[in-house]
Amino acid sequence: MGFDPATLKYNDQGLIPAIAQDETGDVLMMAWMNAEAVTKTVESGRVTYWSRSRQAFWVKGETSGHTQALVEMRVDCDRDCLLLIVRQEGPACHTNRRSCFYTAVRDGKEVEILSPIRD
Amino acid sequence: MGFDPATLKYNDQGLIPAIAQDETGDVLMMAWMNAEAVTKTVESGRVTYWSRSRQAFWVKGETSGHTQALVEMRVDCDRDCLLLIVRQEGPACHTNRRSCFYTAVRDGKEVEILSPIRD
């Protein structure tokens, strides 16, 4: 079956959550796409989100150089969430950490489990 | 710092997305939690979502037996997404597949990459 981004289920703002996971299995971040961002991502091979704060396309790494090359896009059973397998250049997080999920909850406390990458 | 579910950022329906990943690295599913579901999950060690369709707590596997034991909860940099490391019993997906992300987009086509688990 041909893949048509219009057949995905978007929320009332026209957005679908997209989880980025690198090839080693680390979950790096979650952000949002609209149908056009899904199309751009598939066609260009460069992961392109929709920035809710800026209300604009967000080609990941365009300014920082920390790009995400799309290895494979996957769709979930309800067609309302995407999993992106990516090749991440440098840190995915704006805090300069490899992953945005650097805070773990352990014994009722928040613990930092990843340090910023030194340039 | 002590972990307080009230300090997370919820959407206008009071929900936060939660990604479940098993210990081998497979991303299994994404669902939603409200603050009380986060508390229940941490306190019970059994992953508990909020079902948007049923408007009720959804203790994963309560009826199917396909439970998710919480290994670790992680919070992202914006505090608006959770990553749950889980020990998944059987399939996570209601289609009886290990993961909900069983459809890959390859060469512009949708390809099924996971089969249902046979009982």
Image: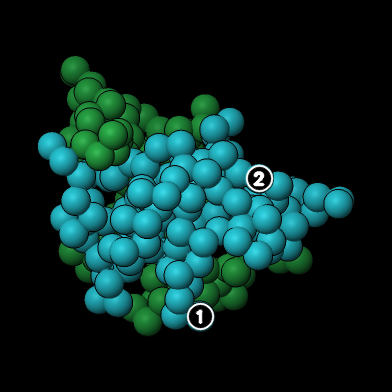
Chain colours: A cyan, B green
* Mark 2 crowd level (few <14, some 14–19, many ≥20, 10 Å Cα): some
Q: Which mark is residue A89?
A: 2
Give x and y (percent) for residue A64: 69, 61
- Distance from disc 2 to disc 1, alpha carbons, whole Å, reads 23 Å
Amino acid identity at mark 2 = Glu
Question: Would residue B114 be found to the left or right of residue A110 on screen?
Answer: left
The N terminus of chain B - image quarter: bottom right
Q: Which residue ends up furthest to the top in the rendered image?
A: B118
Q: Identify the element where label 1 is drawn.
A: loop
The C terminus of chain B - image quarter: top left
Mark 1 = which residue?
A53
Give x and y (percent) for residue A41: 40, 52
Along the line of sight, which residue is nearer the eye, B117 or B72? B117
Question: Would residue B11 be found to the left or right of residue B81 on screen?
Answer: left
Q: Residue at x 55, y 48 (%)?
A: A68
Above or below, B88 relative to B16: above
Image quadrant assignment for residue A16: bottom left
